[in-house]
Amino acid sequence: MTIRDPLFVVLLLFCISSAKGIVKLHCTVASRFAHTVMTSTALNKANSSQEIFFEVDLPKTAFITNFSMEIEGQIYVGVVNEKEQAKKQYEKAVSSGRTAGLVKASGRKMEKFSVSVNIAAKSNVTFILTYEELLQRKFGKYEILTRINPKQLVQNFQIVADIYEPQGIAFVDAHATFLTNELLPLVEKTVTDNKAHISFSPTLDQQRKCPECDGSLINGDFIIKYDVKRASSLGDIQIVNGYFVHFFAPPDLPRIRKNVVFVIDRSGSMAGPKMIQTRVAMESILSDVHPDDYFGIILFDRSIEPWKQSLTKATEENVDEAIKFVRQIYPRGTTNINDSVMKAIHMLQDDRRNKKLPERSVDMIILLTDGMPNEGESNLQRIQQNVCEAIGGNMTLFCLGFGDDVDYSFLDVMAKQNNGVARRIYEASDATLQLQGFYDEVASPLLSAVDLRYPDNAVDSLTPHHFSQLFNGSEIVVAGRLSENDMDNFLVEVFANGDFQVQGEASVTDWDVIYPEKDYIFGDFTERLWAYLTIQQLLETSPYMYIFLCVLLLLPPCHYTFCSVDGDPHFMIELPEREDALCFNINESPGTIFNLVKDPSIGEPTIGDKMVAPDGKVNTYFGRLGVVHHSLGVRLEVTTEYINLFQDGQKVKLLDSVKFVILLHKVWKMHPYHQDYLGFYTLDSHLLSPSVHGLLGQFYHGIEFEVGDLRPGEVPEKPDATMYVKGHQLNVTRGWQRDFRKDLKRGKNVPCWFIHSNGTGLIDGSAEDYIVSGLFKTV
């Protein structure tokens, strides 16, 4: 069978035959937002230590919020790291014999998490995994799928799902591929108007393949499908705890005509099963094209061959002729992606210009390829630019990458640039069904250019609310944070092409009234759903923010480099793994702006004192800090007097998820020459990319150095030494700097090796190399 968008897949491998164990999965769904807790306990009854493996396959769109392990009453909690850092720490832990786990790609839509641990004789281990995901509506239903294979009989086995939908539940269906006639009655289902409870708890004997067998019947898919009631064309809006979520999938909308061009790769690499499956899939797809739609076909290798020079209406006669054409597709030659897609674009544009297509219809291109462009234009970025400029936002491009040799990231970016999505088609016996399934998802557009609008004065931090299409059986979800509590005039408007317009006022959903027996399912679910959508948006726009889970268990907490700048200004790099620190000062003129962290760019300036001190020294401090994220169009400005956040030039409210600490040091206003200043502390430098740089950024992933030849310094309590770093031999002095992260008022003295002369020899280049021309400039 073809599996579409599973919520989670679980595989448990207990390498102890005598361990009966516990496996419990509890999935709670509140308004499509699924919160899953998986608990698994295994007991080692043997007289010697044994190894236990814990493996879970979960969808790439799920976010793990917790993983912990309990052994003999001691709890070990996992940590989340940036993917490259996680991989390095995982490999380091494994090579040294420590317990570690890692999430990595596994299959079509899955990430595989696995961990193993040695358990002493007569001991047990409990694994607890928690993750969350917004259920996607496809083909008119939501699906929760659990693939489970415990590999043995389990003493306490339980799958439980609780679904809470204030809109009302239209239907719920639950079944499993491994159900026998004896197991079927064990699937219990209770459904009321707005909640459902599903459970499956076979006993040890009920799991057996036969009365005397140790083998288990539990091996396959447990599937729950459901949908909600839909009465309003405006959709469902829920407001809980200062956040709102808007589900938009109006019922009974008429389909929009579509004009689709299929661009099919017939190069030599498509030979064999891929070409056979493509021909079969295209026959089925063409047979399903709606009679009111228009379609075209373009074959390409090194040359471009359109079936016809214009799109054709999907009459029975034309479809039969097209099917005969695709039956004659045979692989040959090289791959010219650029010219084939450009041909499809020009075909649609010409037919539009000559009024050959219905006025109220949508244009789309579906590209299927299995390889890299090696004929014509082969530069991937130039192809993406050519296609994006030619389309100009006036049509949608869907990209299907067939097999493992295709550059999927190239197709993914090109599709997203043109309001579409990419999908990998896996080389398997069901590839034909994969192709047909994707076409079925996009075959029936209901609305195009959908724009959801909310009161500017009541809402901020919106997730994406402009969508190129709404397809039949799908759903649009928008979430946001409320800036005021008065919801009496919360007006919502939805606009789309074709004169579609609906508006109405939202009302607060009182979950305590709807579900009085529950304190809260998980009461902040609207905020978590908003955060989930926001993180998804960031992952799409900033690849370095894509995090993998690195679980380091049975060992001390992970150590990172903590970097800060404070005071006059004093730079400090703390290295917990070495239990040491480095520090240096930068002396520059007032008003100088330095680039502290560039990933892609952050610039922070210094300002001078109000007047020269009695000793004639001009002390400089940080008076303004600026953070810029170019791809998101976000600029953050922090001064000693105010904080401003701008997005695309517009001032917006300050977000909560700032990943550094900025401290304001207040100075007596009547002081003759000192003034207020800022301190800048990085708490999670490990999340930045390996290419991060800047006065602070260059140290975020550590630095190698050696210190020797300790000798008396000018001050008895501050000895000098020789430091060997970056090929330099430096004279350094032992001293200390104040760290205000934990003690905001007094600070804490941190011992460090002080590098003289503006950090010369320690920093890359000289301090002048980090001076930029403006707060939000990179040069």
Image (cartoon, rainbow, N blue to C red):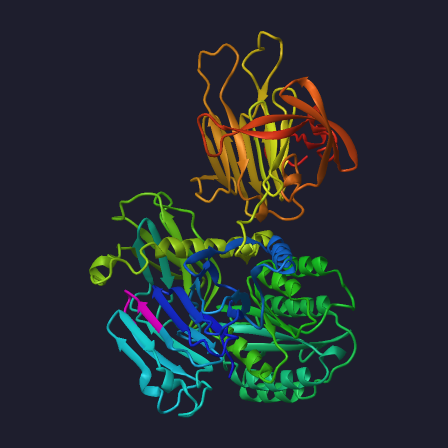
Percent position of residue 727, x then y: 79, 37
Q: Is residue 24 visible?
A: yes
For the C terminus, the image quarter is top right
**Of 382 and 346, which appears nearest the observer?**
382
Q: Is residue 267 visible?
A: no
| Residue occupying the point 26% across, 45% down | 486
Residue 35's x, y, as percent?
39, 63
- Magenta stretch bounds: 160-169
Question: What predominant SS class does the magenta segment belong to?
Answer: strand
Judged from this view, the residue extending furthest toward the front is 47
Is 60 placed left or right of 301 in the picture?
left
Residue 672 counted in the magenta span: no
Give me the residue at 61% from left, 52% from top: 85
In the rendered image, residue 420, in percent from the top left (x then y), is placed at 56, 65
In the rendered image, residue 604, in percent from the top left (x then y), is placed at 59, 31
In the rendered image, which quarter is residue 185 located in? Answer: bottom left
- In this rendering, position of residue 337 left or right of residue 573: right
In front: 561, or 615? 561
Residue drawn 43% across the image and 53% down it: 531
Residue at x 51%, y 37% (from the top left corner): 636
Front in this rendered view, residue 531 or 328:
531
Relative height, residue 496 to residue 195 (above, below): above
Is 532 left, or right, of 91 in this rendering? left
Task: Give the tally of numbered discs.
Answer: 0
Q: Is residue 524 above or below residue 765?
A: below
Q: Quadrant of residue 568?
A: top right
